Amino acid sequence: IEPSIAHDPAAQGMAADGFSRTLSLLPEAHVYKLPPRPSAGGWRCQEWPKTSHIFTGRCRITAWGDDCTVALEDRETGTLFAQCPLNNEAPELSVEPVADSSRYFVLRVQDGQGRHAFLGMGFAERNDAFEFNVTLQDHVKHVRWEAEHAKELIAEANAPAAPPTDFTLKGSVSIALPAGKAPKARDPDTTAAPAHGGGGMLLAPPPPTGGGQSRRRVGGASAATAASPATSGACTTTQPSADSFGGSADAFGGSADWATFG
């Protein structure tokens, strides 16, 4: 059958009932009329003669819901030339790569009335061919993931609900809680100053002063005599009595005289 069957207006309005998304738009694609299918080895683009080239246009990949279509359109007017619905279960039956090139494919185009034909399609740029192939693969993966996810949701919804867990205590149950040790009160006696009876040497108290008189240490009797005035009764020299250390020595361990000044 001729490729002109793809001009059916009903096929162009298939996306009217849903939201159509353009997955990819490739600016230049060449379409070829194919020779009879080879018996083995698959299609080979080197076997397509130049005279079999029938159309040059753009390739648009659209999707609505789970359906995906490869449409060949006129680059100027956007008129549909042919379209290839993608089989999500077996995409290689709709778009088949050739055996001798990564830029050429064989499309199974349909007219929406049950008739189909095979057309060859090739891209001048290798990047366009790569994008075409990856776009179709991503769509198929997405559809399959959604189908698996929907099955999981249905299985979870139909699964019997788990019985409620009973956390009540059965019978006589004793629960022991660790009380722990109370903090020990701080002993106030431990911070007090040590008693005077402990270790360490303490000096004896200074000798008492008598009658409000001040006593000053002098070097000896000669010093007291030298310091005494010539007048009578102004200063008298006395010898100190034995101190608390058992002798006439002073508190610093030496013998000394004490002069009393009136």
Image (cartoon, grey):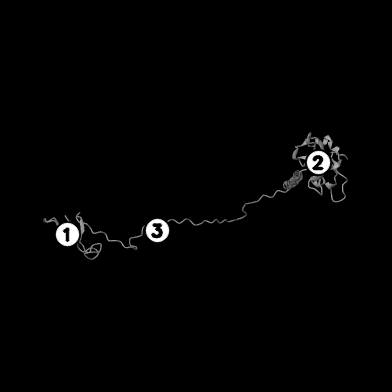
Is residue 141 shown left or right of residue 183? right
Residue at far front of view: 50
Badge 3 or badge 2: first in the primary sequence: 2
Asked whether residue 60 appears in the rendered view, the answer is: no
Residue at far top of view: 77
Residue 230: quadrant of the picture? bottom left
The circle drawn on residue 188 is none
Helix, strand or loop for disc 2: strand
Badge 1 or badge 2: first in the primary sequence: 2
Q: Nearer the viewer, mark 1 or mark 3?
A: 1
- Contact (Cβ within 8 Å) of mark 1 with mark 2: no
Q: Which residue is denoted by mark 2 in the rendering?
A: 30
Residue 65 percent location from the top left of the image: 76, 40
Give neighbour class at mark 3: few <14, some 14-19, many 20+ (Cα, 10 Å): few
Asked whether residue 104 appears in the rendered view, the answer is: yes
Q: Which residue is denoted by mark 3 in the rendering?
A: 190
